[in-house]
């Protein structure tokens, strides 16, 4: 089947009242234009409304991507930063909305950066700059940004990203820990607009890339504290250690 026809069907379903996640004509047109095949190698899954995984990172379902794009709501020629670029699909749609040269993106995982660059090139958006950076640091060389999109959860908006917003800019991110809300934040960190619940992986810091031994910082820290507690035990206390669990 013609991919353009399948894309139209996908966006039609996202506009239907059953989902209603695509609401603007600009996002609708952009998603009908950007191919998903370069970003989702499995053609049978490319236009299915479900998430996938690639190199340890989540590939957003089309409905999740649409929610982010509608929240960002960029104007033509806005400068946009994508933090946690993943495979690059949302960056491509944003490039369609504002122009490839106006979109920069970062990811902490070098493999993902290479993947996103190649995917964007194949999709026709090779002008998007993708750099390997700690997402919380943003990309100050190209600031200020009219829009910043974070595709990872944070408990509070990272200060560096707020500082890189233009005076009337908006930061869009999943805010929270176990319970997350898609949130729009102004440059001062206030005026928060909440757009419903979401579930994203936490923003990673150096050493927590998908190809490292332990990705989840909380679990790693808990394991470290438990190991330290075991090592502090002496004498009769050792009898109470479950050595099967300790190995």
Image: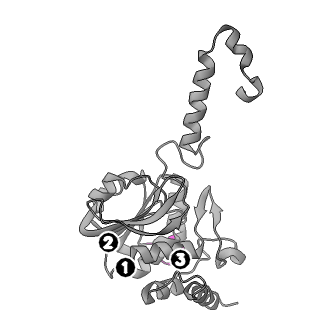
- Which quarter of the picture shows residue 24? bottom left
Check residue 79 in the rendering and tell me which mark sits there, or answer none: 2
Toward which corner of the image does residue 59 lie, by quadrant? bottom right
Residue range of the region highlighted in magenta in the rendering: 120-126
Q: Is residue 123 magenta?
A: yes
SS of the residue at dot 3? Answer: helix
Q: Distance between the residues labelled 2 and 1?
A: 8 Å
Q: Position of residue 115 (x, y in %)?
A: 55, 62
Give whichever of 179, 184 is nearer the camera: 179
Disc 2 + disc 1, Cβ < 8 Å:
yes
Give coordinates of residue 98: x percent, y percent: 37, 79
Of residues 169 and 37, the one drawn nearer to the viewer in this rendering: 169
Regarding residue 139, the answer to whether it shows in the image is yes
Q: Quadrant of the N terminus?
A: bottom right
Q: Which of marks 2 and 1 is nearer the N terminus?
A: 2
Residue 29 image position (x, y, % from top left)? 48, 88
Is residue 141 located in the magenta-colored stretch of the structure?
A: no
Residue at 68% over, 13% down: 237
Query: Mark 1 — residue?
Result: 98
Task: Residue at 33% x, 81% y: name it.
Answer: 75
Q: What element carries label 2?
A: loop
Tags 3 and 2 touching, CB below 8 Å: no
> Is residue 221 depicted above or below 45 in this figure?
above
Task: Give the total number of marks visible in the rendering.
Answer: 3
Q: Report which residue position mark 3 lands on.
A: 123
Mark 1 or mark 3: which is in front? Answer: 1
């Amino acid at each position: 089947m013609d991919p353009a026809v399948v894309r139209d069907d996908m966006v039609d379903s996202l506009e239907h009242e059953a989902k209603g996640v695509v609401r603007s004509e600009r996002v609708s047109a952009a998603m009908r234009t950007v191919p998903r095949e370069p970003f989702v190698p499995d053609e049978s899954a490319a236009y299915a409304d479900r998430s996938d995984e690639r190199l340890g990172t989540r590939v957003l379902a089309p409905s999740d991507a649409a929610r982010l794009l509608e929240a960002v709501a960029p104007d033509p020629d806005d400068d946009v930063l994508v933090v946690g670029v993943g495979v690059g699909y949302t960056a491509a749609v944003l490039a369609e909305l504002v122009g490839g040269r106006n979109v920069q993106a970062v990811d902490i995982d070098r493999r993902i950066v290479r993947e996103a660059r190649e995917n964007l090139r194949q999709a026709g958006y090779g002008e998007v700059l993708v750099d390997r950076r700690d997402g919380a640091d943003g990309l100050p060389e190209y600031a200020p940004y009219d829009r910043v999109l974070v595709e990872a959860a944070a408990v509070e908006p990272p200060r560096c990203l707020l500082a890189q917003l233009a005076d009337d800019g908006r930061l869009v991110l999943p805010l929270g820990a176990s319970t997350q809300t898609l949130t729009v934040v102004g440059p001062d960190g206030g005026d928060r607009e909440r757009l419903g619940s979401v579930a994203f992986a936490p923003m990673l810091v150096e050493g927590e890339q998908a190809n490292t031994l332990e990705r989840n910082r909380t679990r790693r820290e808990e394991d470290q504290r438990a190991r330290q507690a075991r090592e502090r035990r002496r004498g009769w206390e050792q009898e109470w250690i479950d050595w099967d669990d300790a190995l």
